[in-house]
Amino acid sequence: MADPSSSEVSERRDDPRAPITLRVDYKRLNTFFADYTKNISTGGTFIRTTRPLGVGTEFMFVLALPTSGATEVALKGIVKWVVEEKDAAEENPAGMGIQFVYADDAERRHVESMVEELMKTALGPALAGKLLAKGP
């Protein structure tokens, strides 16, 4: 897939994103990968990788959360867009845009709450509050 411009990517996002780096583990065929997020929102994340899955691929992945103790959250996502390594740039790294897929509303609320707490911890309550504020 062609390298999406920053404005094209921003237009596809429904939720504001925070620049948070988390370890993410997932399986592709019979191989396990460990990559990192570039940012996260209540609706999805961007996983930095030179080995992206194909657009439309649904997969399970595990986020390692920066808490006291080893906390991991298993999530399901779908690849919405890809930046191939050959098309990557400093401001637009190789990887894949992931939209979270929820089993039900309770899971959605749980993940949204977790992401909001991550944003508050990483950015501070004031900036996180501005990012999370629902516009008109």
Image (cartoon, rainbow, N blue to C red):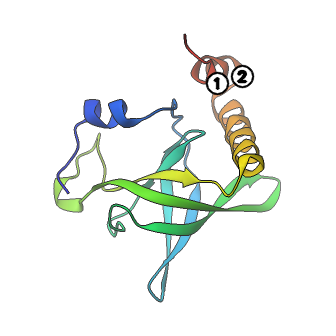
Asked which quadrant contains residue 79, the reply is: bottom left
Residue extending furthest top?
Answer: 136
Indicate the position of residue 7 as horizontal and vertical percent values.
Answer: 27, 29
**Image point (72%, 22%), residue name:** 125
Q: Are marks 2 and 1 in contact (CB under 8 Å)?
A: yes
Which label number is shown at residue 49? none
Indicate the position of residue 97 as horizontal and vertical percent values.
Answer: 40, 51
**Image point (65%, 34%), residue name:** 119
54 or 91: nearer the eye? 54
**Left or right of residue 90, residue 68 in this image:** right
Q: Quadrant of the C terminus?
A: top right
Task: State the count of labels.
Answer: 2
Indicate the position of residue 111 as horizontal and vertical percent values.
Answer: 70, 47
Distance Cα–Cα, label 2 vs label 1: 5 Å
Per the image, the residue denoted by label 2 is: 125
Per the image, the residue denoted by label 1 is: 128
Q: Secondary structure at mark 1?
A: helix
Q: Secondary structure at mark 2?
A: helix
109 or 123: nearer the eye? 109
Callout 1 amino acid: Ala
> In the rendered view, would you say 118 is above or below 60?
above
Asked which quadrant contains residue 72, the reply is: bottom right
> In the rendered view, would you say 135 is above or below 2?
above
Q: Quadrant of the N terminus?
A: bottom left
Callout 2 amino acid: Pro
